[in-house]
Image (tube, rainbow, N blue to C red):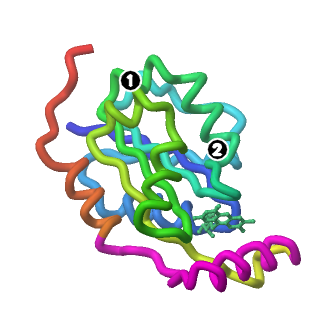
Amino acid sequence: MDNTLIVFASDHGTVEKCARELFSLMNGKVDLCNLNQRETLPELSTYDTIIVGGSIHSGKIQESIATFCDEHFELLATKRLGLFVNCLYTGEKAQKQLDDAFPGLLSQQAIIRDYFGGEVDELKLSFWERMITKQMIEKDDLVVALSKEKIERFADIISTAYEPKNT
Ligand SMILES: Cc1cc2nc3c(=O)[nH]c(=O)nc-3n(C[C@H](O)[C@H](O)[C@H](O)COP(=O)(O)O)c2cc1C
């Protein structure tokens, strides 16, 4: 049976929402690991599939996700891997942010990588965060939205054609 871990970090709840959506859409046994709420990790070697997700702030993925990928690089490279980010940009800019978010070899190794869009909940943001996101949205005329289709496609691709790795 497929055995999946979704490791994520979420500043204001969007990545967590996407991780939970993937959790509900995926087959087999699925565990969630919120890096912001855990001091210890589950035993990564026991999972066949690992999904890593974070959000982009000022062009970069959260430090906790970058550190997780660096510290567990070798083990992650042996897994069926899915990578996603939440961000407000779309198109080439979003693709570049996604490319820069994870180590190149993990990106190459991933069965699927995607950006799911983003959200801005003004009630959860600080004054400065509101200013930054307002400027981004106005300057680039961004449409703030999450793509349910992309999340469903991601879950579908990583759930199907499951073949355990011999490592
Ligand atoms: C201070 C700040 C900076 C951000 N910078 C970027 C950025 O550089 N590029 C981008 O596409 N989205 C950017 N975003 C949008 C976030 O990626 C988006 O709001 C996402 O949904 C946040 O998810 P989270 O709350 O789960 O961390 C920024 C958001 C904030 C609050």
Where is residue 49? Give x, y as percent. 33, 36
Residue 40 in the image: x percent, y percent?
66, 31
Q: How many marks?
A: 2
Task: Based on the picture, tell me whether residue 130 belongs to the magenta stretch.
Answer: yes
Identify which residue, 3 or 50, lies in the foreground. Answer: 50
What main secondary structure does the magenta stretch of the protein show? helix
Q: Residue flagged by tag 1: what amino acid is it?
A: Ala
Which quarter holds ligand 1? bottom right
- Which is in the foreground here, disc 1 or disc 2? 1
| Residue 45 position by quadrant | top left
**In the drawing, what numbered circle is on residue 77?**
1
Cα distance between the residues tagged 1 and 2: 19 Å
Q: Residue placed at 30% from the left, 33% from the top?
A: 80
Quarter of the image containing the N terminus?
top left
Report the front residue among 127 and 5: 127
In the rendered structure, which segment of residues is drawn in magenta? 127-149
In this picture, residue 70 sits left or right of residue 109: right
Mark 2, residue position: 35
Q: Residue at x 41, y 46 (%)?
A: 83
Label 1, residues with CA under 10 Å away: few <14, some 14-19, many ≥20: some
Indicate yes or no: mark 1 CB to ligand 1 under 8 Å.
Answer: no
Residue positioned 64% across, 49% down in the render:
60
- How far across and down, in percent of the image, does residue 38 sit? 68, 41
| Residue 4 in the image: above or below residue 55 | above
Determine the secondary structure under disc 2: loop
Q: Secondary structure at mark 1?
A: loop
